[in-house]
Image (spheres, rainbow, N blue to C red):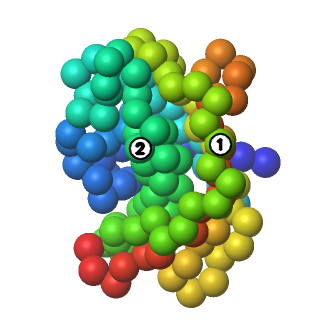
Amino acid sequence: MMEAAPRYDILSLIPQRPPFVVVDRLESCDQGSARSSFLVKREHILVEDGELSEAGLVENMAQTAAARVGWLIQGDNKIIHIGYIGDIKNLEIATLPKVNDLLETEILVKNQIFGITVVEGKVKCHDKILASCEMKIFISNKS
């Protein structure tokens, strides 16, 4: 069962910084999953012609995974390391979200070994799946 995530400043959980942040809040989190939310804003760098780009959707899933790791280690006073998307499989984008859409993103950890995590991600808006994929994320030793 997912735990409600205490209201942290999202920037304390992820290595990304504006203008590339595509997660507003970590809604819930546990060892194997996380849910986030993001309101698409017109001025965001990844918004093109009033829609969040494909890259924005993929980055949203990756940052949700990063927020999960940040939440898990935040009590240990560990430095948040940078992760890199190493592989994306089965990427499906049904539609691009529009400005003022509220995205709800969920990631499920499928496998984790050493510095590699495989997650399955889904981005929804109004209970419709906008995008989904499986991604392999490599964690760097550098912050």
Q: Nearer the viewer, residue 74 or 24?
A: 24
Identify the secondary structure beneath mark 2. helix
Question: Seen in the image, is 84 located left or right of residue 93?
Answer: left
Q: Residues within 10 Å of mark 2 (few under 14, many from 20)?
A: few
Residue drawn at point x = 41 percent, y = 39 percent:
56
- For label 1, the crowd category at 10 Å Cα-Cα, with few meaning under 14, some 14 to 19 and many 20 or more, is some
Give the image quarter of residue 142: bottom left
Q: Which residue is mark 2?
A: 55
Q: How many marks?
A: 2
Camera-nearest residue between 12 and 19: 19
Front in this rendered view, residue 137 or 72: 137
> Residue 32 at x, y = what percent?
69, 60
| Type of the residue with mark 1 | Glu
Residue 109, by quadrant, is bottom right
Label 2 amino acid? Answer: Ala
Cα distance in 3D space between marks 2 and 1: 12 Å
Which of pointers 2 and 1 lies earlier in the amino acid sequence? 2
Question: In the rendered image of this protein, does residue 70 appear above or below residue 36?
Answer: below
Q: Is residue 6 visible?
A: no
The residue depicted at 34 percent of the width and 71 percent of the height is 81
Q: Which residue is located at x 21 percent, y 39 percent?
A: 19
> Residue 46: where, in percent of width, then height?
31, 34
- Percent across and percent down for residue 140 are 36, 79
Relative vertical location of residue 65 with respect to residue 123 in this rendering, above or below: below
In this rendering, does residue 131 appear at all? yes
- The extreme right residue here reads 1
Badge number at residue 92: 1
Disc 2 vs disc 1: Cβ atoms closer than 8 Å? Answer: no
Q: Secondary structure at mark 1?
A: strand
Seen at 53% across and 56% down, the residue is 65
100 relative to 137 in the view: left or right: left
